[in-house]
Amino acid sequence: MTFRRSLPFALLALAAFAVMAGLAARHTGITFDEPAHVTAGRAYWQAHDYRFQPENGLLPQRLEGLPAEWSHEPFPAAGNAWRDADVWGVARTYLFGPGADAMRIVFPARLVSVALGVLLLALAWRWSASLWGERGGLVTLVLGAFCPHLLAHGSLATSDLAAALGFTAALLAWWRLLHRVTPARLAAAALATMFLALSKYSAALFAPIVLVLAALRLARRADLPVRCGGHVWRLRGVFRAAALGGAALVVALLTWAGIWAGYGFRYSAAPGGGEAHFAMPWAEVLIEHTRPSGSVMADGVTARDEVELRPGIVQHAVRWARDHRVLPEAYLYGLAFVDRFSRHRLAYFAGEFRERGWIEFFPAAFLLKTTLPALVLVVLASLAWKRQPRRARLAYRLAPLAALTVAYWTAAIFSHLNIGHRHLLPLYPTLYVFCGAVAALAWRRWGALAMVLVAWHVVDSLAVRPHYLTFFNGLAGGPAGGHRFLVDSSLDWGQGLPDLRRWLDANAGSARVYLSYFGSDEPARFALRATRIGDGYFDHSPSRQVLPALESGLYCISATMLHRVYTQVRGPWSDGYEAEYLRLARWVIAQQAKPLAEWRGSDGKPIDDLSRKLELSRLAQLRFGRLCRHLERRAPDAVVANSVFVYRLSDAELELALRIDP
């Protein structure tokens, strides 16, 4: 079909997405995962070393490392961090070391995601137009171009947008292949599947989707055209199954070869083909020793949902594939790593903390972070479909959308990895394609309402720009209320430092500044003269104070830190926390007048330097937890970039929050 009438509008929408995502890429601070992605990608090009972060998809990281490779940015290629495949250690030198300019490296890498986002939207537009006509295609395209989540992750150097593109492209390519087998369609299916397999290990979900779609195609009695050269055969009966099976085998073999090509047709993850030493040993990711795993809190209590780790089908399969060198070592390691750490992962949801997640986490995230007009359009499209007299035929055309939706939702709901709404990103292109049905099936009835809803969607997106990552709809109370339900990469992924710097320049004056920051950006590159508190897991500065004095001033606390997700003091303030806080605080008061060499432990015996620092660190965690307990009861004085809460605290209020005698 032609797209002459809608093409100018489509190009305008694609350009709008590119501009909005590009501006967000320039404005947004570095998010938590980005340093590892751009560093690993550069290591792949610079040294052909695939030990760095293989669990996050080779291809997106390769693409994101390419701009810095082309521009010959200095790259650290030696040291303990490199030897140990410590991607975070190398990243701190690469991005934040002397003479480094982090955004000069990260911004071009982000533009790769912008380009992938444009490709994704173009694909969704063409697919929707083939189903619903040009008007339906434009509805899909506008929804996608102004989707806060596609804009958020389309402006970050991570693998989430690449995974969404991979799922969409592979789904469409396979659906076309199942209806007409040609060399071009075989190549398209192979390239799309290869792209998906090298982008995210959730690609494993695609195999059952293909099986379901193939079964649906074979259940339909229509002939299967097969073209090779100038010859066309129209196959029937069992010959269709044989042809599709052969086509699937060809695509699988090409994908397998493509994975090997991505790693330079080399088994070893280490350059030179030697023995690879990963940041975490093989024994850990293969779970060679069954054991319990869980968090220990500052009061000495182990988290309630402790998990017993034992090897499963993935570990056994990876061990066999490793022994027979079926796939590159780094690819197998990444697969085992992802499975190992998807068994349990600390997460926050609506005031609760769990290691094994919630069934309702992703449904709630979807309802709270999808724009309300898009949700209404889904309902209208469903009603329009149900009113059609030939629903069965239409349902068949929608089968690939339904298959991905059902498979992905099933996996998401039962997943223990509940750390971010971003893991639902592959569902949004198919959702917007389905919304295009309103334009074809019910435009006369609901056309005016659909236009209002699309405009509302655009307004919601523009209202939150450029802080697209923080979008929440009215059900959550908007971005300001979202932290009550979700944090981490659903709201606060460390991106707020540039906005905080600007806010402090305008409002701080001579006040002392305290910062509790969740993220891997470096406050020093913004000349933030702040005392860090509560965030020892994310502050690698050698000058960090273990237990700094707290005085009146501005307390700037990331939303994730305010809810103490990654601390040893999670959940409600308990009697155990209170008792341990009082004990340690009184111990410090009793010892602080003495020289360090004369300090004694709580048992009265001499205490070494390491033990003293561990006790002080535990007190710092408890003190921060007690402070946050107080701050949760009062409104912040400002909220910066929807993700950093600022409190102006006096000495009297600090005394009230932290006093030793309650």
Image (cartoon, helix red, strand yellow):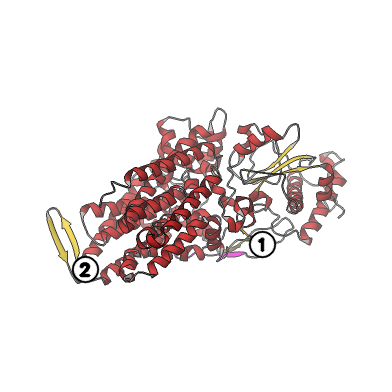
The residue that disc 2 covers is 222
- Front in this rendered view, residue 381 or 574: 381
Could you say which quadrant of the image residue 536 lies in? top right
What's drawn in magenta, residue-wise?
Answer: 305-314
Q: Determine which of the numbered discs, if any, sits on residue 303 in the image.
A: 1
The C terminus lies in quadrant: bottom right
- Residue 350 shown left or right of residue 99 in the figure: right
Label 2 sits on what residue type?
A: Ala
Bin the neighbour count of mark 2 within 10 Å (Cα to Cα): few under 14, some 14-19, many 20 and up.
some
Q: List x then y, in percent, for residue 622.
A: 75, 52
Label 1 sits on what residue type?
A: Ala
Looking at the image, which residue is at 86% across and 40% down?
594
Residue 615 in the image: above or below residue 553: below
Q: List x then y, in percent, for residue 429.
A: 41, 54
Distance from Cα at disc 2 to Cα at disc 1: 57 Å
Could you say which quadrant of the image residue 545 lies in? top right
The reply to whether residue 577 is visible in this rendering is: yes
Secondary-structure class at tag 2: loop
Q: Nearer the viewer, mark 2 or mark 1?
A: 2
